[in-house]
Image (tube, rainbow, N blue to C red):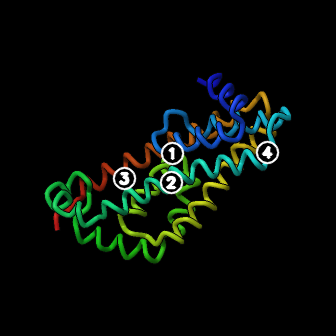
Amino acid sequence: MNHWVVRLIEESGYLGVAFLMFLETLFPPIPSEIIMPVAGVTAANGKLELSLVILSGTAGAMLGNIFWYLAARALGIERLKPFIQRHGRWVTMNWREVQRAHGWMESHGSAFVLLGRLIPTVRSLVSIPAGLLKMGFRPFLIASTLGTFAWTALLAGAGFRLKSNFEQIDQFIAPIADTVLVVMVLIYAYRLATHKAH
């Protein structure tokens, strides 16, 4: 799969980087941990400019981020109220907690989105709660763009610096992603065990 990514980026340039990052955000067939380092290596080989690689990756990812935000906002948390009231145990939230989350998002939404974009596994999901809980579009856009830019710059910069040894990036990030996933599962299991319907 890496060879396919390399070929697409070499043949399509910045548009290929943006397209892959857009796809990764919509439905992650190829993680950004592969796309952006490969693009960084391509820049290191003189075929692309690093700054434009970062901007292209950020733009592509942001198109996907905005899509999920708008889709979730159009759905709205109110439409999920009957589902939450009936199956709240399995989502480990009751309606009162949802209302509290709405207030929390109004106060801390920007920090949630900004930091969420920098956490493997979580970063692709951040747009959905932001949209469902109707976080303002402008703060979402600013925080999401900053976080996405930082993430793509980190990965592309690492690929640019490490060149052919960019696999080391995945060796560093993969354990972090696995740890985040395990923590999320443990939190879910705890909330499931301690969930109260009201």
Disc 1 crowd rating (10 Å Cα; few below 14, some 14-19, many 20+) is many
Which residue is rendered at x = 17% and y = 54% of the image? 87
Q: Which residue is mark 1?
A: 25
Q: Which mark is residue 50?
A: 4
Q: Earlier in the sequence, mark 1 or mark 2?
A: 1
Disc 4 is placed on an element classified as helix
Residue at the disc numbered 3: 187
The correct choice, above or below, for 31 with respect to 87 in the image is above
**Three-letter code for the amino acid on which mark 4 is drawn:** Leu
Residue 62 percent location from the top left of the image = 56, 54
Label 1: which secondary element: helix
- Seen from the viewer's position, the closer of residues 149 and 22 is 22
The residue that mark 2 highlights is 65
Question: Hey, what amino acid is under mark 2?
Answer: Asn
Do tag 2 and tag 4 residues touch (Cβ < 8 Å)?
Answer: no
* Residue in view at x 44 percent, y 48 percent: 183
Which residue appears at 48% of the width and 50% of the height?
122
In percent of width and height, residue 177 lies at 53, 42
The kind of residue on which mark 1 rests is: Thr
